[in-house]
Amino acid sequence: MKRSVRIFWYIFFAGFICCVLIIMLANFGAFGKMPSLKELENPSILQSSEVYASDGTLMGRYYRERGNRSNIEYKDISKNVINALVSTEDKRFYDHSGIDFKSTLRAVFLLGQEGGGSTITQQLAKTLLDQGSKNKAWRIIEKVKEYIIAIKLERNFTKEEILALYLNAVPFSDNVYGIRNASRTFFQKEPDRLDVDEAALLIGMLKGNTLYNPRRNYKAAFDRRNVVITQMEVNNKLTHVDADKLRSLPIKLNYRKMDENNGYAPYFREVLKGEITDALKDVRSSDGSPYNIYDDGLRIYTTINPKMQVYAEEAVAQWMPVLQKAMSSQNYLKNVWKDHQAELDRYMKQSDRWQNMSDDGYSEKEIRKSFTEKVPMKVFAWNANREKDTIMTPLDSIKYSRQMLQSSFMCMDPITGEVKAWVGGISFKTYKYDHANLKTKRQVGSTIKPLLYCQAMEERGFTPETICDNEAQYFPGNGWVPAGRKCVGAAQVTMAGALAHSLNCASAYIMKNVGAPQFADFLSRLNLPTKVDVVPALALGACDLSLYEMLWGYSIFAGRGFSTKPYFITRIEDRNGNVIKRFDYSSNRKEVVSEATAYRMARMMQGTVDVGTAAGLRGRLGISEMGGKTGTTNDNADFWFMGYTPQLLAGTWVGCDDRFLTLASSAYAGGRVARPVWEYFFQKVLADKSLGIEKDARFVVPADYENITDSSSEYDLLATPVQPGLGGEDEGVGKEQDFKIGNEYIPPESKPVIEEKVKVKTDTSALIPKVNKQPVEEPKKKKGLFKRLFGKKEKN
């Protein structure tokens, strides 16, 4: 044998051995960890977690940009998408076993001038491995790893499974990941409903999701879509006539990208995020790692009712502009910040502008100067878009923003504790701070009084007919309550009358009979987490509690004496539909007072909404039985209304984040400021028969309850109505026509993520969809090196 021939064979076998060695080293992880067969069966592609309402409506998602994907099964993907993908990216997909050697050789010899040689399976492997090095030498190693994974995928999954996994993983334009999100974002439809031209547009993006973005590069996207349509024609997926018609169509988008502001109940979902993190801190996934709400494709099922959520947001949006107009018209606002310069400085230094300029090296003097120079900006405004363009100084924009009245609203089932609606503020897009959650506390004012009266009834023998001294009370060591010793109304009133008209002096009398330590203990027995100061002024609401806690406490009235903690999560599933956390709320209910006391309080609290500080509310709504209570704090910093029917309990709060910013006029009180939000919500709920909230529902009469007094005779015992303006707590002097809702309709923040909703069930679709169709038959292969190296798992 000639020396040259021997050298050739030496080089050939050396090269072959090197190739085999590189393949084996890559397979065993020498160039980076390779996924095992088990990991390939359950790939850990980043996947957004989804939040569902009580009826299965998708409320929104938690994700990092790359994790914002929602996986679907092969059967739920339009055949148009499959045909477009295979025709364009890998026309011999059904004939090869992961590597198309013909395409690979063509790409090598023509240097990629007629396209690359990667198959769909190889592209999927690249995505699974998160590869794409710019270093050419290292890219060769990556290619070897992709070949290995591609063959493993082909030997362990059907063609349909590979296509579904690929389409669930790849990025489309605008950093949208997965075919389902792409379909929803660009066309507002599910992927099984995509037309041919829509499917071609989306598949065309895969070649260059920035270059072929139809919103930014219409012409390039149009041409690329037509290339895909042509490929479908070439591969006999379309007739020439149909292809010509499709190529002539313009691109029509129905674009709306999902972000944290989209979907239902944005404030609620932000609070829910923290609750989920806490709930799963001790739960581990199958590989022992903690669950990640952004990456692990969790499915969180909640108690929120989408219709009630929309009605709650509408209620806030229709009433708050009216209040804001009154707020902004107050003369004292012109000079209020002169007395609060420290707060203004703090807000400046907390702003993004200050932080960014500081990071860029500007001096404090330069930064402060920039806050006094007018610049174009967008600010919150009460209109359909909840924003407006304007020109003002950054300093004025801070004042403008802080002077916006905020509001919160929460609704729950008083028996079960299920939260039905949650509004944490006036605009999540602008104001992220949530005012409804457990940690956000404000002074509650007179809304505390029903709890005090309830304890007096349960433990001190008081009844609605009990005569109370309506005079200021002296408490040794604490002084007089009320502090100003100002009382209105008759010297003596019934307890029912005192509650209906929210009389402070009579409430102080009841506190003297109950005792401040005993009342603080009663609040603790309600399971309210906040520990209040033990002072007699508790009788008038001199404590800070959250709206969440107020609903918790008020649940005893319609809840037949049981304090019921509000809850909003039912279960959490992993991406494969396995329940990883089910929530047991059996311990959430605790009996605090007798059913008879709860019933008597519910009937007595009807006085407030019939003739008291929220007079006429029950009549306007046409409700048979209900209870309610208004609340206003010192200087009108906080306004409350709490109310309930036998089926539903809701509360609302209104105020500015800075307590020195108030609706200063005596015309404003809880009955006029907060009550309209509650009333609007119940008008909508009662009108919607599908919700099952009945006007004629009545509180359940306890079985052992005797000497029942009907509501009309109870009201005969009420004190003579207090004349408005004489200082009665929560009595306003404004006229009802001064508080009419405007003509402009401002839509709620909640909007459907997609028109369809999922069926609520325990078993949901897996990431790797298992199809009912028979796997595509592959050519028989001989057992050889690759078979022995990679192994094969029999397909089911």
Image (spheres, helix red, strand yellow):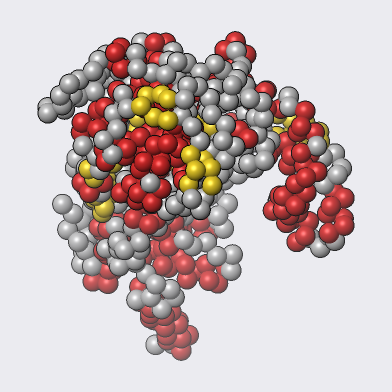
* Residue drawn at x 35%, y 43% as measured from the top left: 514
Q: Residue 267 at what x, y percent from top left? A: 49, 40
Q: Quadrant of the N terminus?
A: bottom left
User: Image quarter for residue 38?
Assistant: bottom left
Residue placed at 31% from the left, 17% from the top?
714
Judging depth in this view, the residue of 161 and 392 nearest the camera is: 392
Res. 413 in view: yes
Instruction: State whether residue 182 appears in this view.
Output: no
Nearer-the-camera pick, 646 or 456: 456
Against 492, is 781 above or below? below
x and y, in percent, of residue 148 in the image: 36, 66
Identified at 31% across, 24% down, the residue is: 465
Q: In this view, does 588 lie above or below 1?
A: above
Q: Which of 775 and 171 is in front in this view?
A: 171
Provide residue 517's location: percent of width, then percent of height: 38, 51
Residue nearer the viewer, 299 or 177:
299
Position of 705 with respect to 203 (left or right) is: left
